[in-house]
Protein backbone atom coordinates (compact mmCIF):
# COMPACT_ATOMS: atom_id res chain seq x y z
CA UNK A 1 0.00 0.00 0.00
CA UNK A 2 1.27 3.46 -1.02
CA UNK A 3 0.18 4.90 2.38
CA UNK A 4 2.55 2.57 4.24
CA UNK A 5 5.59 3.46 2.18
CA UNK A 6 8.21 5.78 3.63
CA UNK A 7 8.56 9.17 1.95
CA UNK A 8 11.83 9.69 0.08
CA UNK A 9 12.83 13.07 -1.37
CA UNK A 10 15.58 13.99 -3.80
CA UNK A 11 16.30 16.80 -6.26
CA UNK A 12 18.54 17.58 -9.21
CA UNK A 13 19.48 20.90 -10.78
CA UNK A 14 18.72 21.68 -14.45
CA UNK A 15 22.16 23.11 -15.13
CA UNK A 16 22.96 21.26 -18.35
CA UNK A 17 22.90 17.82 -19.92
CA UNK A 18 23.07 14.81 -17.60
CA UNK A 19 26.34 12.91 -17.58
CA UNK A 20 27.00 9.21 -17.21
CA UNK A 21 27.97 10.03 -13.61
CA UNK A 22 24.56 11.62 -12.94
CA UNK A 23 22.77 8.67 -14.49
CA UNK A 24 24.69 5.83 -12.83
CA UNK A 25 25.26 7.64 -9.52
CA UNK A 26 21.72 8.98 -8.99
CA UNK A 27 19.05 8.63 -11.67
CA UNK A 28 19.33 4.85 -12.14
CA UNK A 29 18.91 4.54 -8.39
CA UNK A 30 15.91 6.93 -8.39
CA UNK A 31 14.16 4.52 -10.76
CA UNK A 32 14.74 1.52 -8.46
CA UNK A 33 13.62 3.41 -5.35
CA UNK A 34 10.15 4.05 -6.83
CA UNK A 35 9.05 0.49 -6.10
CA UNK A 36 10.02 0.60 -2.44
CA UNK A 37 9.23 4.18 -1.37
CA UNK A 38 6.81 7.03 -1.99
CA UNK A 39 9.26 9.10 -4.03
CA UNK A 40 9.06 12.86 -4.46
CA UNK A 41 11.58 14.19 -6.98
CA UNK A 42 12.19 17.84 -7.74
CA UNK A 43 13.84 19.66 -10.64
CA UNK A 44 15.65 22.22 -8.50
CA UNK A 45 15.61 25.30 -10.73
CA UNK A 46 15.63 27.70 -7.75
CA UNK A 47 18.94 26.24 -6.57
CA UNK A 48 20.43 26.72 -10.03
CA UNK A 49 20.10 30.52 -9.78
CA UNK A 50 23.13 30.65 -7.48
CA UNK A 51 25.19 30.54 -10.70
CA UNK A 52 24.10 32.89 -13.50
CA UNK A 53 22.28 31.40 -16.49
CA UNK A 54 20.14 33.04 -19.15
CA UNK A 55 16.36 32.63 -18.81
CA UNK A 56 16.18 30.85 -22.17
CA UNK A 57 18.90 28.39 -21.17
CA UNK A 58 17.28 27.60 -17.79
CA UNK A 59 13.86 26.96 -19.36
CA UNK A 60 15.41 24.72 -22.04
CA UNK A 61 17.47 22.78 -19.50
CA UNK A 62 14.42 22.33 -17.24
CA UNK A 63 12.22 20.70 -19.87
CA UNK A 64 15.14 18.64 -21.20
CA UNK A 65 15.94 17.35 -17.71
CA UNK A 66 12.28 16.40 -17.22
CA UNK A 67 12.39 14.48 -20.52
CA UNK A 68 15.63 12.73 -19.49
CA UNK A 69 14.20 11.67 -16.13
CA UNK A 70 10.99 10.34 -17.67
CA UNK A 71 12.93 8.55 -20.43
CA UNK A 72 15.18 6.92 -17.82
CA UNK A 73 12.11 5.53 -16.03
CA UNK A 74 11.32 8.11 -13.33
CA UNK A 75 7.60 7.80 -14.05
CA UNK A 76 6.06 6.36 -10.88
CA UNK A 77 6.89 9.31 -8.63
CA UNK A 78 5.78 12.83 -7.88
CA UNK A 79 8.00 14.77 -10.29
CA UNK A 80 7.75 18.58 -10.30
CA UNK A 81 9.61 21.83 -10.91
CA UNK A 82 10.72 23.44 -7.64
CA UNK A 83 9.80 27.04 -8.58
CA UNK A 84 6.23 25.90 -9.39
CA UNK A 85 5.66 25.26 -5.67
CA UNK A 86 6.03 28.63 -3.93
CA UNK A 87 6.02 26.96 -0.50
CA UNK A 88 9.73 26.16 -0.97
CA UNK A 89 10.64 29.85 -0.87
CA UNK A 90 8.13 30.59 1.91
CA UNK A 91 9.40 27.89 4.26
CA UNK A 92 12.99 28.93 3.56
CA UNK A 93 12.34 32.33 5.16
CA UNK A 94 10.98 30.77 8.35
CA UNK A 95 13.92 28.35 8.49
CA UNK A 96 16.35 31.22 7.85
CA UNK A 97 15.07 32.80 11.05
CA UNK A 98 15.94 29.59 12.90
CA UNK A 99 19.39 29.12 11.34
CA UNK A 100 22.58 30.45 12.91
CA UNK A 101 25.18 32.32 10.86
CA UNK A 102 27.91 30.11 12.33
CA UNK A 103 26.42 26.87 11.00
CA UNK A 104 25.95 28.31 7.50
CA UNK A 105 29.45 29.80 7.31
CA UNK A 106 30.95 26.40 8.15
CA UNK A 107 29.45 24.73 5.07
CA UNK A 108 32.34 23.35 3.04
CA UNK A 109 30.40 23.41 -0.24
CA UNK A 110 29.84 27.17 0.13
CA UNK A 111 33.59 27.68 0.53
CA UNK A 112 34.35 25.48 -2.49
CA UNK A 113 31.73 27.13 -4.70
CA UNK A 114 32.88 30.55 -3.52
CA UNK A 115 36.36 29.71 -4.77
CA UNK A 116 35.02 28.50 -8.13
CA UNK A 117 32.69 31.49 -8.61
CA UNK A 118 34.66 34.24 -6.87
CA UNK A 119 33.06 36.86 -9.17
CA UNK A 120 29.55 35.92 -7.94
CA UNK A 121 29.56 35.06 -4.23
CA UNK A 122 25.87 35.80 -3.63
CA UNK A 123 23.64 35.31 -0.59
CA UNK A 124 21.82 32.48 -2.40
CA UNK A 125 25.08 30.55 -2.60
CA UNK A 126 25.38 30.76 1.17
CA UNK A 127 21.67 30.15 1.82
CA UNK A 128 21.51 27.15 -0.52
CA UNK A 129 21.53 24.59 2.37
CA UNK A 130 18.52 26.27 4.04
CA UNK A 131 16.52 26.09 0.80
CA UNK A 132 17.60 22.45 0.59
CA UNK A 133 16.29 21.89 4.13
CA UNK A 134 12.96 23.47 3.12
CA UNK A 135 12.80 21.16 0.07
CA UNK A 136 13.12 18.12 2.32
CA UNK A 137 11.08 19.19 5.36
CA UNK A 138 8.07 20.41 3.34
CA UNK A 139 7.28 16.83 2.34
CA UNK A 140 7.89 15.23 5.75
CA UNK A 141 10.59 13.19 4.00
CA UNK A 142 11.90 10.34 6.11
CA UNK A 143 14.72 9.43 3.74
CA UNK A 144 17.08 11.44 1.52
CA UNK A 145 19.65 9.81 -0.79
CA UNK A 146 22.92 11.66 -0.22
CA UNK A 147 26.41 11.57 -1.64
CA UNK A 148 29.51 12.53 0.32
CA UNK A 149 29.23 16.18 -0.81
CA UNK A 150 25.67 16.55 0.55
CA UNK A 151 25.99 14.91 3.99
CA UNK A 152 26.68 18.24 5.71
CA UNK A 153 23.57 19.78 4.15
CA UNK A 154 21.38 16.90 5.32
CA UNK A 155 22.79 17.32 8.84
CA UNK A 156 21.63 20.95 8.75
CA UNK A 157 18.15 19.79 7.65
CA UNK A 158 18.04 17.39 10.59
CA UNK A 159 19.24 20.09 13.02
CA UNK A 160 16.66 22.61 11.78
CA UNK A 161 13.83 20.05 11.99
CA UNK A 162 14.77 19.12 15.57
CA UNK A 163 15.27 22.79 16.57
CA UNK A 164 11.87 23.82 15.18
CA UNK A 165 10.15 20.80 16.78
CA UNK A 166 11.70 21.62 20.17
CA UNK A 167 10.74 25.27 19.94
CA UNK A 168 7.22 24.99 18.51
CA UNK A 169 6.20 21.31 19.12
CA UNK A 170 6.37 18.36 16.74
CA UNK A 171 6.06 19.65 13.16
CA UNK A 172 8.66 18.06 10.90
CA UNK A 173 9.86 14.51 10.34
CA UNK A 174 13.60 14.38 11.01
CA UNK A 175 15.06 12.97 7.78
CA UNK A 176 17.52 10.10 7.73
CA UNK A 177 20.19 9.63 5.05
CA UNK A 178 19.45 6.89 2.56
CA UNK A 179 22.75 5.12 1.91
CA UNK A 180 22.65 3.60 -1.55
CA UNK A 181 23.62 -0.04 -1.91
CA UNK A 182 27.08 0.11 -3.47
CA UNK A 183 26.57 2.64 -6.25
CA UNK A 184 29.77 3.05 -8.23
CA UNK A 185 31.27 6.55 -8.15
CA UNK A 186 31.90 7.46 -11.77
CA UNK A 187 35.13 9.34 -12.38
CA UNK A 188 36.48 11.47 -15.22
CA UNK A 189 37.66 9.50 -18.25
CA UNK A 190 40.69 11.79 -18.47
CA UNK A 191 41.44 12.32 -14.77
CA UNK A 192 40.22 9.22 -12.90
CA UNK A 193 41.13 10.85 -9.58
CA UNK A 194 38.31 13.39 -10.09
CA UNK A 195 34.55 12.86 -10.23
CA UNK A 196 32.97 12.98 -13.71
CA UNK A 197 31.50 16.45 -14.21
CA UNK A 198 29.87 18.35 -17.07
CA UNK A 199 31.84 21.43 -15.95
CA UNK A 200 35.10 19.64 -16.84
CA UNK A 201 36.94 21.89 -19.33
CA UNK A 202 38.01 18.75 -21.20
CA UNK A 203 34.93 17.34 -23.04
CA UNK A 204 36.69 13.97 -23.33
CA UNK A 205 36.47 13.63 -19.54
CA UNK A 206 32.72 13.07 -19.48
CA UNK A 207 29.99 11.30 -21.45
CA UNK A 208 26.54 12.87 -21.63
CA UNK A 209 23.19 11.18 -22.14
CA UNK A 210 22.92 13.15 -25.42
CA UNK A 211 26.21 11.88 -26.91
CA UNK A 212 25.90 9.89 -30.14
CA UNK A 213 27.31 6.32 -30.37
CA UNK A 214 30.29 7.62 -32.37
CA UNK A 215 31.09 10.32 -29.80
CA UNK A 216 30.75 7.86 -26.90
CA UNK A 217 33.05 5.36 -28.62
CA UNK A 218 35.63 8.05 -29.38
CA UNK A 219 35.64 9.25 -25.76
CA UNK A 220 36.16 5.75 -24.39
CA UNK A 221 38.94 5.07 -26.90
CA UNK A 222 40.72 8.16 -25.52
CA UNK A 223 40.03 7.21 -21.88
CA UNK A 224 43.07 7.21 -19.61
CA UNK A 225 44.15 3.78 -18.42
CA UNK A 226 47.16 2.83 -16.28
CA UNK A 227 50.59 1.30 -16.48
CA UNK A 228 50.73 -2.41 -17.14
CA UNK A 229 48.23 -4.28 -19.31
CA UNK A 230 46.02 -6.25 -16.89
CA UNK A 231 42.34 -5.38 -16.68
CA UNK A 232 41.95 -5.52 -12.89
CA UNK A 233 40.41 -3.20 -10.31
CA UNK A 234 42.83 -1.78 -7.75
CA UNK A 235 43.87 1.48 -6.09
CA UNK A 236 46.97 1.46 -8.29
CA UNK A 237 44.77 1.36 -11.41
CA UNK A 238 42.15 4.15 -11.01
CA UNK A 239 41.57 4.48 -14.76
CA UNK A 240 40.91 0.79 -15.35
CA UNK A 241 38.85 0.55 -12.15
CA UNK A 242 36.62 3.41 -13.32
CA UNK A 243 36.05 1.74 -16.69
CA UNK A 244 35.26 -1.59 -14.97
CA UNK A 245 32.72 0.18 -12.73
CA UNK A 246 31.03 1.69 -15.79
CA UNK A 247 31.04 -1.64 -17.64
CA UNK A 248 29.57 -3.53 -14.69
CA UNK A 249 26.91 -0.85 -14.11
CA UNK A 250 25.55 -1.43 -17.63
CA UNK A 251 26.05 -5.20 -17.95
CA UNK A 252 25.06 -6.23 -14.42
CA UNK A 253 28.27 -8.24 -14.08
CA UNK A 254 30.42 -8.23 -10.96
CA UNK A 255 33.94 -6.78 -11.05
CA UNK A 256 35.35 -10.32 -10.68
CA UNK A 257 33.30 -11.56 -13.65
CA UNK A 258 34.44 -8.62 -15.77
CA UNK A 259 38.09 -9.14 -14.81
CA UNK A 260 37.81 -12.79 -15.88
CA UNK A 261 36.15 -11.79 -19.17
CA UNK A 262 39.02 -9.46 -20.07
CA UNK A 263 41.81 -11.72 -18.85
CA UNK A 264 44.64 -11.72 -21.39
CA UNK A 265 43.02 -8.97 -23.47
CA UNK A 266 44.53 -5.55 -24.10
CA UNK A 267 43.26 -2.13 -23.06
CA UNK A 268 42.11 -1.38 -26.64
CA UNK A 269 39.66 -4.29 -26.74
CA UNK A 270 38.54 -3.55 -23.18
CA UNK A 271 37.76 0.13 -23.85
CA UNK A 272 35.82 -0.77 -26.99
CA UNK A 273 33.67 -3.26 -25.03
CA UNK A 274 32.95 -0.62 -22.36
CA UNK A 275 31.90 1.82 -25.08
CA UNK A 276 29.60 -0.80 -26.65
CA UNK A 277 27.93 -1.50 -23.28
CA UNK A 278 27.33 2.22 -22.69
CA UNK A 279 25.97 2.81 -26.22
CA UNK A 280 23.61 -0.16 -25.86
CA UNK A 281 22.51 0.90 -22.36
CA UNK A 282 21.78 4.50 -23.32
CA UNK A 283 20.05 3.72 -26.63
CA UNK A 284 16.50 3.16 -25.25
CA UNK A 285 16.78 6.26 -23.03
CA UNK A 286 17.93 8.42 -25.93
CA UNK A 287 15.16 7.12 -28.20
CA UNK A 288 12.47 7.65 -25.55
CA UNK A 289 13.77 11.14 -24.75
CA UNK A 290 13.70 12.20 -28.42
CA UNK A 291 10.12 10.92 -28.63
CA UNK A 292 9.07 12.82 -25.49
CA UNK A 293 10.61 16.11 -26.64
CA UNK A 294 8.41 15.98 -29.76
CA UNK A 295 5.40 16.38 -27.44
CA UNK A 296 6.30 18.97 -24.80
CA UNK A 297 2.61 19.31 -23.96
CA UNK A 298 2.68 15.75 -22.61
CA UNK A 299 5.77 16.46 -20.49
CA UNK A 300 4.11 19.63 -19.16
CA UNK A 301 0.94 17.71 -18.27
CA UNK A 302 2.98 15.30 -16.14
CA UNK A 303 4.83 18.18 -14.47
CA UNK A 304 1.51 19.92 -13.74
CA UNK A 305 0.20 16.74 -12.14
CA UNK A 306 3.39 16.51 -10.09
CA UNK A 307 3.12 20.17 -9.11
CA UNK A 308 -0.42 19.71 -7.82
CA UNK A 309 0.57 16.61 -5.82
CA UNK A 310 3.61 18.37 -4.35
CA UNK A 311 1.70 21.56 -3.59
CA UNK A 312 -1.00 19.67 -1.71
CA UNK A 313 1.57 18.15 0.68
CA UNK A 314 3.69 21.32 0.90
CA UNK A 315 0.71 23.59 1.71
CA UNK A 316 -0.37 21.31 4.57
CA UNK A 317 3.11 21.49 6.12
CA UNK A 318 3.49 25.24 5.57
CA UNK A 319 0.04 26.02 7.04
CA UNK A 320 1.06 24.14 10.18
CA UNK A 321 4.36 26.06 10.34
CA UNK A 322 2.68 29.44 9.85
CA UNK A 323 0.17 28.69 12.59
CA UNK A 324 2.89 27.63 15.03
CA UNK A 325 5.11 30.66 14.49
CA UNK A 326 2.11 32.96 15.00
CA UNK A 327 1.36 34.36 11.55
CA UNK A 328 -2.13 35.89 11.55
CA UNK A 329 -4.10 34.13 8.84
CA UNK A 330 -7.13 35.83 7.24
Image (cartoon, helix red, strand yellow):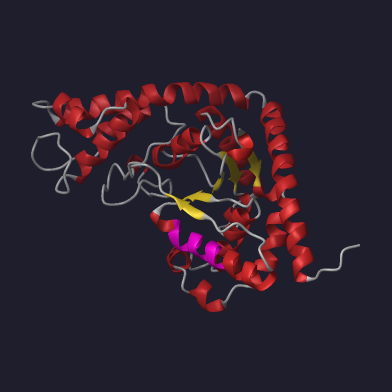
Q: Foreground residue, 118 or 163?
A: 163
Stretch of the chain drawn in magenta: 150-159
Residue found at x 68% / y 32% = 302
- The quarter of the displayed image where residue 240 is located: top left
Asked whether, in this view, residue 22 is left or right of residue 134, the answer is: left
Question: Residue farthest to the right?
Answer: 330
Q: Which percent across, then down, holds residue 206?
A: 36, 41
Q: Which percent across, then down, holds residue 217?
A: 31, 27
Tell me if residue 263 can be seen. Answer: yes
Residue found at x 87% / y 64% = 329
> 171 above or below 309?
below
Q: Foreground residue, 71 or 100?
A: 100
Q: Which percent across, then down, holds residue 200?
A: 38, 49
Residue found at x 49% / y 61% = 153
Q: Which percent across, then down, holds residue 264?
A: 8, 26
Asked whether, in this view, residue 101 is left or right of residue 299, the answer is: left
- The quarter of the displayed image where residue 183 is located: top left
Residue found at x 57% / y 62% = 128
Q: Main secondary structure of the magenta part?
A: helix
Amino acid sequence: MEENKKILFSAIQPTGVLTLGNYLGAIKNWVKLQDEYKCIYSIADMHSLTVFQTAEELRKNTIELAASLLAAGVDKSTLFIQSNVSEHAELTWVLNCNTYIGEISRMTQFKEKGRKHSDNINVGLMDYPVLMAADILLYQAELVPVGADQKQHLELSRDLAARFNNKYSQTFAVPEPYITKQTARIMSLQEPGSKMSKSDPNPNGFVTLNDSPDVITAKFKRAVTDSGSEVVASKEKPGVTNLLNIYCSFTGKTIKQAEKEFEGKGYGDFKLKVAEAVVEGLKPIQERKAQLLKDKGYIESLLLKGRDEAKYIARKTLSKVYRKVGFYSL
